[in-house]
Image (tube, coloured by chain):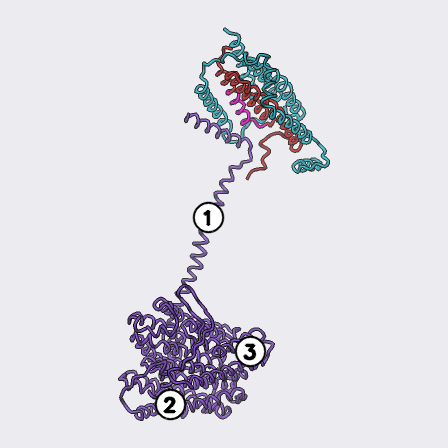
Chain colours: A purple, B cyan, C red
Amino acid sequence: MLWLIPALPLAVAVLNLLVGKRLGRWAGVLATLAVAVSFAISVAAVADLLGRPAEERLALQHLFDWISVGGFRVGADLRLDALSATMILVITGIGALIHLYSIGYMAQDPRRGRFFAYLNLFVFFMLMLVLGANYLVLYLGWEGVGLCSFLLIGFWSDKVANAEAAKKAFITTRIGDTLMLIGLATLVFTFGTLDFVPIFGTASSVLTKDAATVIALLLFAGAIGKSAQLPLQVWLPDAMAGPTPVSALIHAATMVTAGVYLVIRSHVLFEVSGVALTVVLVIGVATALFAATCAIAQVDIKRVLAYSTISQLGYMFIAVGMRAYAVAMFFLVAHAFYKALMFLGAGSVIHGMHDEQDMRQMGGLRKVMPITFVTFLVGALAQAGIPPLAGFFAKDALLEVAQHSGRTAVYALGTLAAFLTAFYLGRMLIMTFFGSARSEKAEVAHESSPLLWIPLAILAVGVAFAGVLELSPDGRLASYLEPVTGVMREGTGLSFLALAGIAVAVAIVSLAIAWWVYGSGRIDPNTFRARMEPMATAAQHGWYVDRAYDVVFIQPAKALARLTGDVVDAKVIDGAVNGVAGLVKRAASGGRLIQTGFVRTYALVLFVGAVAVLGYIGVRV
Amino acid sequence: MPLDNVVFWVFAPISIAAAIGMLVMRNVVHAALFLVVNFGCIAVMYLLLDAPFLFAVQIVVYAGAIMVLFLFVIMLLGVDRSDVRTERLFLQRPLAVVLAVAFFVEVAMAIRAGVGFSTLAPEGFEALQPTGNAQAVAEVLFRDYFFPFEVTSILLIVAAIATMVLAQRKVRAITQAELTGTAEAEAAS
Amino acid sequence: MRTPIAYFLLLAGLLFAMGTVGVLVNRNALRIFMSVELQLNAVNLTLVAFARMHNDLTGQVLAFFSMVVAAAEVVVGLAIIVSIYRRRRSVDVDDIREMRW
């Protein structure tokens, strides 16, 4: 029955691709139903899994032999274990809610049939990614979600900027994907197979530390691309050009978390290497801080959320780098909930503001869009780490692991990032919902239809109570994931209460400062920002990384292309070809003069030849 | 001095002189007549070489038929006026002369190497033809070369028909493409 | 016969060379044609001379065929010259210059 889970969205995707236009609003309904039913089946499958004792929580399904060449075999195999079970619940559950939301959000768009087709297709590929029992099925899903991301970012393709953003996303992730593919090839070369079970079973005996490092880093490169970590983070802020449900589903809850999933799934390889995990940790810390600084300076509500996502993904990698896989997974789940919630809420805001995304034009929306405001607030506070919402538990667990394992630097920087996170969230909340309306659009804004706020409400409830999953090294989620992730080492340090207290205090202080700057009216936000110049503008432009890439890579590549096109192709190659042709022409031009037309000339030449031949024979004989 | 030699040394120069005359004469008719003289001398040469049949055929066919035809056409077309003297092809005349000389020298060399300037004709040619030259030629012709003989007769027929067609003025229902072009242009002009 | 055969051959060669000069130098088609006939005769003479030298009548027969075919050739050739004259009012071969660059 496992195969039904991805098959349903695929079937409806194909249906919508073919007859979507004629289905009208039923396209969206069918699409939502497909994912919802998938969710139901997933719940059933997971329940069945949980019913078994811990050692037997594994379901494998072999669909067909995919590749069979010589001794190398790859099957289309599905694998349901604790890790993939968590993922499919998140994907189908949040996915279904987002589909429901999209029915309302895209109601006016004439091409929504195609939209839902792509969305369902994305769910299919994402499910394949996490259900794969070998790296090739995973890679199939990996590439597929990249494709769907491209299609969906550039969905409103009549605007060039959207198409450019889609292209940028695809190419940037491609860099990571290619390195990952090399990693896969190395795996085949080393292990002779791509199946998880044999690879993870024999990794420690077959791989040397260096080999494991190489493979792990190659795989991590793919994760860097997909999860928008440093240095490949540039595509995610631009990807906000796509419709908001897309941002919610793909760029918050699911696709970007594929990188985290990949590393957790391959943790055996990373552990054999050791160095690789350190690399993951460092990049996670760097990205978390980098993105948080950028988020503070954004004026587009979606871009704040985009940088926020990058930052939170960094947190997840910090957890992974510390071998706290269960913490990372919990963070992933919690983040999926509250980030999707905030994105959908932002969509609701944009909808109500008649497609205005600049926060400077907003203000005071809490009075006109109460439901959106409340749900958004829940999400933001969750991310900021206010108990008893989900984010608090996740972040607190992470920092606890850092502190207990003696990684004080990580603990300090993580706390700093938390401070910044709370600050930019507060700023976003205040600029959007509090104060007085700063533009006409804000004055006439209205609450969205139920189709839009019902998913918001459901997610908010989820966010509020996700803490139930409870987290500590021997918490429920951790033990549930144990068969996959292995046991986490416990350390000692500050007590739970002390750490929690510090974290909450940091969050509240940060929010208070945000209120002081933006909400209290005692400081002019513009002067505040002006005093931070030129750092503020730099932060807003992502510390000019895009510009750097443009100068270092893109312009030289374009120049090379121009060189090849205009010089090498036009002058050298065409020149050679034309030159040969010209040569032939000139030779022929000269040669044709032989044909004088005078018969007597021909006769003379004939006679010359005859005399010559006779002479030659005469001499020889 | 043997009679053969005398005859040879009389008619050979005449033959050469006639050839030169043919080349240099301005009037085409005169040139043709000089050629007739040359043919006559050649016929005598044949006689010297014990080929009386060919002697007769040469006079009848060449001098009598071919040159007559030539003269007919010359006078019919009225091209007996003199040629323009200036040669407009570069080096044509000098080269022609030089090459002809070179050719003759080569031939002389070949003859000296192959035959030798002093070998005489062997005896026994008469003995080969007990019933006379014409009969002997006829025997060889109709026995050994009968097939070429028949083919040649077909050739003659073809030539005769071709000439009739080529020389016609008005053409009716001619199927050969090259003749159609000529005739239609003729009819138009 | 007391004349060395070589002399006949040399005479033939000389006549052939003169015929060639005639072909190359003349512009009147009829003159050219006559020079060609001179060449043919020279060749015939060579053939007959060799027939005598080798005591073989084949040379004479070949010369005979040569004459027959030459006659046919003259007939056709003159007909062609007549046709050309009718179109162009001239038999100057330098004027027939279409097949050139």
Label 1: which residue?
A580
Q: Main secondary structure of the magenta part?
A: helix
Write down the quadrant of residue A513 in the picture: bottom left
Is label 2 or label 1 in front? 2
Write down the quadrant of residue A326 in the picture: bottom left
Label 2: which residue?
A470
What's drawn in magenta, residue-wise?
C13-27
Whether label 2 touches label 1, CB < 8 Å: no
In percent of width and height, residue B77 lies at 66, 26
Distance between mark 3 and mark 2 Cα atoms: 39 Å
Name the chain under label 1.
A
Name the chain under label 2.
A
Label 3: which residue?
A112
Distance between mark 2 and mark 1 Cα atoms: 78 Å
Quick check: is C15 in the magenta stretch?
yes
Which is more N-terminal, label 2 or label 3?
3
The residue sitting at 49% across, 91% down in the picture is: A371
Q: Is residue C99 left or right of residue A526?
A: right
Q: Is residue A66 above or below residue C77?
A: below
In percent of width and height, residue A105 lies at 53, 83
Question: The disc labelled 1 sits on which kind of residue?
Answer: Val
